[in-house]
Amino acid sequence: MIKKLILALFCGIIGTLFVAQNDPWVHQQIGNAFKTIYARAFHCTVTGNVEGVDFVHPHITLSNFSLSSSDGKGNWAWTAQQYHTGFSWPFFLLHRTIDMWVSAKNLTVTTDMYDGTPSITPHIKALMSVPDLPIKIILKSTQIKNVSLSIIGEDTQARLCWDSNSQRTPSALTSRFYLKQGTITHQQQTIAHSLRGTLSTEVKTDPKNSESVIAINGQIDLPQLGEYPTCFITGTWHNDRGRFNVQSIDKALRINPLILTQKDSTLQFNTSASFPVAYFINLLTKSSTSPIQGSCVVHAQGSLDPEGQCEGYVACEDLTNPWFTDRSVITCSFKKQQSNLHGSVNLRTGTRSSWHGLFDWNGIKESGSCQLYNNISHPIPYSSRWFIQPHDATIDVSYHKPTNRFDLLYHTQATNSLTNATFDASGTIHTHKQNTIEGNGSFGSYRYEVTSTPAPPYLQHLTLYDAKGESLVTVVYDEQKNNHTTHIAMPLIRTINTKIFDHEMHGEGTVKITSHIKENKLYAQIGLKDATIRLPQTYNFINGFDASIEADISTKRITLRNIQCTLHSGSVYSPCATIWLDAQGALQFAHVPLLIDHCLFTIKQDLFTMISGYLLFAQQPHEKGCLSGHIMFDRAQLKENLFSQQEQKKLFHAASSLQEIPQIPLTCNISIETKDPIRVDTRFLQADAEVNLHVCDAVTKPRVSGTITISSGSINFPYKPLQISKGEITFVEDQLFNPAVELVAKNRIKNHNITLNVAGSVQNHAILLDATPPLTDQQIVSLLLTGAHEESLTAVIPALLMQNVSNFIFSSHKSDFFDSYIKPFMKQISVKLKPEFNDQTGRGGLRGALEITVNERWRALIEKNFSLTEDTRFELEYMLSDDVTFRVIRDERRDVGGEVEMKWKF
């Protein structure tokens, strides 16, 4: 009977439980009790709906089960769309312990940051520990699918997605996490994404063996790395020590190893890492294309405790950018003690620049500073005479994190190595919370104001003023058009040419540049506005210029299209020019064609010419640049002696200096010829010359071959000119300033047919004189110089007279004021002074004659004995024809008479 009662009671209980587990009131009571236990055990707020209860196989099913923070230490919450938990009756009855299993689906976790860590961290630790309940509870297994964790900080957000499962064995609790996706953003910039892989943990449950092992094997993409963003992460943690490695596909980023050690309550680290500098710059500037390239190496060790100590070394090597060709190196050693960080920094650019400084950081005030100075002499770029002496340049940098303010103060003094003149520059740069950079300063008598951003388009506004406050340079960014407009005043360009490049430049106007950057390419349009620029050593002016520029910043390839240079007289055009630079910024390849149309070209005051033709500047890798082409002299005038060696050197040196490109070894291969003869116009030589020359080899030391042919002209001796019947200057290679000369000139002077022959070279020549009727060389020279051959002038200084003939032909003869302005009005009258060193009258003394020639028929002669005042002779001559001459004479005795001279040929 008792057995039947017990069986009936058991069946009644089972039936009651079976009916009760489906009763809504029971669900509500059990749910309230379950949520109360969770809230007390984990100090949180619990909500959820009970969907089912099973007392036979004890478990509970909840929907929209949510736990959220309630302690005021940050905000966190996690919600499971479905949450199942239960235990085993047999295990509970045998061990008086609940072996809980948990299964959840579509778990969403959100948390903010509190005191530097996620607010949910204490709750996770509480879940992993044993709760303080009357009945012991152990976690037997878990299975969670589609977990989504969102960590939301003030500037940083992270989102992780994974599946996980855990299983307890008699000796250990093993867990495995399958990472499906992960993303980290900072200030709305994605710094990591596509996190995937596995994370496994194994914790020994034996009290005598508390061993724990964590292993990770995954990968993540870092977009700021550029072309190869994927990095592999591997590592293990064993008890109190772990070793981890991070490496990108191309090994540009490597953290190998990262060693973590747990000592007491602090975590120690020791790491070596290397990564591209561009990665770090891209993180700071929120850009994907850093202009600065190089690699960074880090060695550090110490404690991760905020109050702990650490020290290390950072080296940034092979730093380059598109604007500076020298490779730079930055090294830094640091040491952290509690909240203070201090150290030293060194900056070296090639072999020409070196900086040293100290820095410190106060963690409590969250502010720091750095002071730098140059410790070697530093040359000014593109100037060979200006230097910054050691310790003459200083830079002070400070940063205050609470206000996000960055301040930079600099001062430098440059010294001219020739004149010891000095040039001062100083200024300040600071940042604002609006993420803008502002600066102002001065250099010399100029001052500037600038506004920029750390990310594209970088420069927002720039203005440069002179001492009077007038604007010299303005750069303005147009946000709607996404371009920069730059105006550069000509006075600034003149000053730069004079002080830095030592070149005089004259001109007025403005250079206008419109530019923008798109897909790592710089596009610009450059032109002149109301400008007039005088070309050096010439009388021509540039009054217009226009060109389109396309520059690939990464490959350093520059293309210029439709280059149009308009001159006051003529124009220069290039349809397309290509320039390639190497990694250091040096010229590697160039192809620059130029079409020249009727341009005025002058060399000082000697040569004036209108030229046309074409030129090509070509540069091949590892070869010298070459300037080749063909030049045609449309019209030309030479104001110097064509035969003068001095003038030949002057012309060639001036031409080569105009063509020379600094720091670029330049050769040439140019043909020069004349369309119309060159007009040579000096007081000695007047001629028309035809040029056919070929210039090759180095511009500074050219090799010239070809001829200059004189088609017509005259040699203007003091008394009467000789007409050139043949003239030629022949240039041969390796004898640039000693060309071969051949010259024949003739004329009839006082009934004599005079012929002048010159043969040889400029430095070694022979002069032959011939006369019909015959005269000696001395008489011919006297006739050419004074118009008289009867006297014995050459008996005293014959060598001097012959040398005078050579000087007339081969020396420089610039036109003076008398030749240019007075002599044209006196062409009808010729006055000559003739000294005489012999006395054929027997009266003694020093005699001289003044001869006045009105034209070829009229001539007057005055002779004077400077020892006897009464001895003066006057003679007036009229040539009726070549054979009949009349003379009226007043002799020294004051007797007046006349002569008739007649010539007959037999």
Image (cartoon, rainbow, N blue to C red):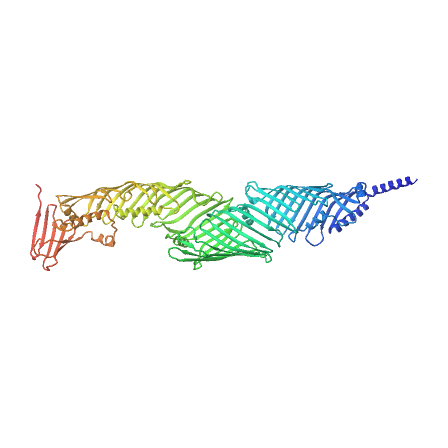
Residue at position x 40%, y 48% from top? 544
- 105, 265: nearer the viewer: 265
Q: Position of residue 412 (x, y in %)?
A: 45, 57
- 227, 688: nearer the viewer: 227
Q: How many marks?
A: 0
Residue at position x 14%, y 47% from top? 779
Q: Position of residue 242 (x, y in %)?
A: 63, 45
Residue 403 in the figure: left or right of residue 525: right
- 590, 368: nearer the viewer: 368
Residue 822 in the figure: left or right of residue 188: left
Residue at position x 67%, y 48% from top? 110
Q: Residue furthest front?
A: 208
Whether residue 142 appears in this view of the structure is: no
Q: Position of residue 599 (x, y in %)?
A: 34, 45
Residue 321 in the figure: left or right of residue 618: right
Q: Position of residue 744 (x, y in %)?
A: 20, 42
Residue 415 in the figure: left or right of residue 652: right
- 276, 902: nearer the viewer: 276
